[in-house]
Image (cartoon, rainbow, N blue to C red):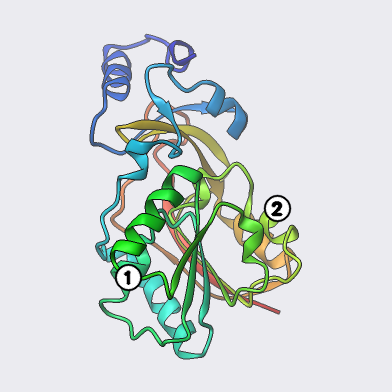
């Protein structure tokens, strides 16, 4: 378990391990593993794992942060161009739908589907009903429902998924016309698997090799329109070789 993550080679490592285990409200990372499954299996027993429980399902803040704007730009361009069937992969309770409607003109034809885990989806449906948003906002737990959508949008979510983006795309009968990724955890040299503490839970976390992620989209039949780096959103995996090099990035790809 987590006792094997960090050897007690220094008081700093021991103090950080204690901080990680007792975290309440910070976004912390710890450890390096061979795979996503290995990271999940090493999660501490004292915390819930992942987002599929009531506490994590209630975590949301429908704000627009400065690092949202690249994705917001391309999503707005897409909607203006008539790409109005949006599939929000890992969109929680519709956070970006509610946040972006304050600055984007949503047409009546917009259909925004959020895909997430069951507890989050249940909460999202209840909130959508309260906010009278059900005409446009729908929910699913199956990423294969992205088949036939205009835009596959993933903001800060790919790193939490046990499947990679190419596996998702290959499972769709009809691929999205556009893919917009934002605040995706990446590394300039390699793929790194770690654990992420979100306070109420610990999640297995994939930090993807940046160039390989873009190459994967190209191999899946897409061509790059734009790519960017989400500056100012911190990410570091302490006491891991190369753990100071991850960053968040995004891109826009169109079906070739």
- The quarter of the rendered structure image containing the C terminus is bottom right
Residue drawn at (28%, 56%), measured in percent from left and top? 232
| Residue 6 sits in quarter | top left
Location of residue 250 with respect to 102 vertically, above or below = above
Residue drawn at (44%, 67%), measured in percent from left and top? 228
Q: For numbered disc 2, what is the local secondary structure?
A: helix
- The circle drawn on residue 155 is none
Bin the neighbour count of mark 2 within 10 Å (Cα to Cα): few under 14, some 14-19, many 20 and up: few
Q: Which residue is mark 1?
A: 132
Q: For numbered disc 1, what is the local secondary structure?
A: loop
CA gap between label 1 and label 2 equals: 34 Å
What is the x, y in percent for residue 250? 47, 63
What is the x, y in percent for residue 105? 34, 86
Select label 1 or label 2 by which is in front: 1
173 and 165: which is toward the camera: 173
Bin the neighbour count of mark 1 within 10 Å (Cα to Cα): few under 14, some 14-19, many 20 and up: few
Q: Is residue 200 left or right of residue 219?
A: left
Q: Which residue is mark 2?
A: 167
């Amino acid at each position: 378990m987590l006792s094997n993550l960090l050897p007690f080679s220094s008081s700093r490592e021991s103090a950080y391990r204690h901080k990680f285990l007792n975290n309440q409200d910070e976004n912390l990372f710890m450890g390096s593993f061979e795979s996503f499954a290995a990271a999940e299996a090493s999660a501490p027993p004292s915390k819930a794992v992942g987002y599929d429980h009531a506490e994590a399902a209630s975590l949301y803040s429908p704000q627009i942060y400065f690092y949202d704007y690249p994705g917001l730009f391309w999503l707005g361009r897409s909607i203006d161009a008539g790409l109005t069937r949006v599939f929000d992969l890992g969109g929680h309770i519709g956070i970006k739908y509610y946040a972006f409607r304050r600055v984007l003109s949503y047409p009546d034809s917009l259909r925004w589907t959020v895909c997430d885990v069951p507890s989050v989806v249940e909460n999202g449906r209840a909130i959508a009903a309260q906010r009278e948003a059900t005409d446009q906002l729908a929910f699913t737990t199956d990423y294969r429902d992205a088949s036939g959508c205009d835009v596959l949008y993933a903001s800060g979510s790919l790193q939490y998924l046990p499947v990679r983006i190419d596996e998702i795309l290959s499972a769709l009968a009809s691929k999205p016309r556009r893919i917009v990724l934002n605040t995706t955890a990446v590394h300039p040299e390699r793929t790194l698997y770690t654990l992420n503490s979100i306070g109420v839970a610990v999640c297995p976390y994939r930090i993807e090799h940046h160039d390989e992620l873009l190459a994967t989209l190209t191999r899946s039949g897409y061509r790059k329109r734009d790519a960017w780096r989400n500056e100012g959103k911190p990410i570091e995996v302490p006491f891991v070789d190369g753990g100071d090099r991850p960053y968040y990035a995004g891109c826009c790809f169109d079906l070739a």
